[in-house]
Image (spheres, rainbow, N blue to C red):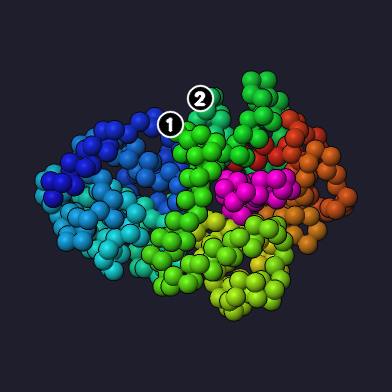
Amino acid sequence: MERIYEISTRLIGALDAPLHRYLYDTIEWQDRLIMIKGARGVGKTTMMKQRCKENGESGVYASLDQLFFNDHTIVELADYHYKHGGTHLYLDEVHRYPRPNWEQELKNIYDSYPGLCVVFTCSSLLQLNSKVADLSRRVAVYELRGLSFREYLNFTGNYGLKSVKLAEILSNHRDIASRIIPTIRVIREFDRYLEKGYYPFFMDSSEFTYSQRVERLVLSVIDIDIPAVAAIEYETQLKLKKLLVTLAEQVPFVPNMTNLSRDVEVSRNQLMKFFTLLSEGSILRTLMDATTQPKRASKPEKILFDNPSVMQALGIMNKAGTVRESFVASMLSSTGRLYAAKEGDFLLDRTYLFEVGGKGKGFSQIADKPNSFVIADDIETGIGNKIPMWLLGFLY
């Protein structure tokens, strides 16, 4: 047991991450059971270590893929920590726990140790697993996304920029932009962000090593994270990778399921499962038509990669239109339910219609549509319903 505390002390003591992510101050840290989920690489571990460090000596951090947990349970750690005066338990990567009943153990800890608070992180894929439902009445769930453009600027320049709600951007984008552009060369910085700014580890990576790390991240989702929550064989992992290679040559597009099934050599049902796995693993983003019934197993109307950094790692940053759509979808999806649009590119909450393009993009494709907006790249400020793309990076 002492080994866990030694490792925790060393890791927390070595942490050098003074800036908080957007989610940090929204979490009700006094809650007794907190789940932080999110894609691999977005900073869940760092944020939990920050909290452990700032909370003092009453907490202990442990990654559940440590060898310790092959012979010991979470309950054993909780019991020891509680009896020795501990008040907080920080458990990383619960989906990597080598035992099958982690959710029951957390439930037992919640019920049996009333003075103990447990914070745990997990893969975004875990929502595919019914185990989470068993904790739903007890756990407070939060989701951490990759860096927004606003966070990227704050990390690189310490500007102290605040987030802006979508309604304010839509109605007052010109004034908001005019307060930012005098001090920041937003177009230059936005281009840099699109190339290597979504994952926080850009801070200690060169452009080349950043791309390599994102590629390894994508492979780890397929080779490690997906098998941890879904029973798949090695051959299935190979076909998931083949699907990514196939999509990299075509996105964004409306998938022809017959052709895609043939190319990847899987059935239509398997292909639908692949889309779900890669979407929940934050590698792809699949968008349905707004008229599709929520429980109906329909094919996606549009497929995108989850964020521009994934595209960079797969070597498809030369497709400007695809990069723009990937970024816009990533930001807008943080505010509500996003759909593929019949006219225009995206429909948000069945209310706001967006067309995405370069600085010369006009309204011809969404003319006379209510609540319609053009999101334009390569402009510092907009006018009317034409909004600079970079400003969507201030949504969180």
Against 172, is 212 above or below?
A: below
Q: Is residue 45 above or below residue 297?
A: above
In this rendered view, identify the residue nearer to me: 38 or 58. Answer: 38
The crowd level at tag 2 (other Cα within 10 Å; few <14, some 14-19, many 20+) is few
Q: Residue at x 71, y 35 (%)?
A: 173
* Viewer-proximal residue among 16 and 111: 16
Nearest the viewer among 98 and 261 is 261
Q: Are marks 1 and 2 in contact (CB under 8 Å)?
A: yes
Percent across and percent down for residue 132 are 38, 65
Report the residue marked by disc 2. 158
Q: Is residue 338 above or below residue 12?
A: below
The residue at which mark 1 appears reads as 19
Judge left or right: residue 138 versus residue 312.
left
Q: Residue at x 75, y 55 (%)?
A: 345
Reply yes or no: does residue 311 show up in magenta: yes
Q: Give me the residue at 50% from left, 39% from top.
A: 209
For mark 2, give the secondary structure.
loop
Q: What span is in magenta?
A: 305-329
- Residue 276 percent location from the top left of the image: 54, 67
For this view, does 351 lie left or right of residue 152? right
Asked if 24 appears above or below 238 in the picture, the reply is above
Q: Position of residue 11 (x, y in %)?
A: 27, 38
* Amino acid tagged 1: Leu
Q: In this orientation, does residue 79 appear?
A: yes
Distance (Cα) linking label 1 and label 2: 9 Å
Q: Is residue 339 visible?
A: no
Q: Is residue 127 magenta?
A: no
Q: Pick the quarter of the image with the C terminus.
A: top right
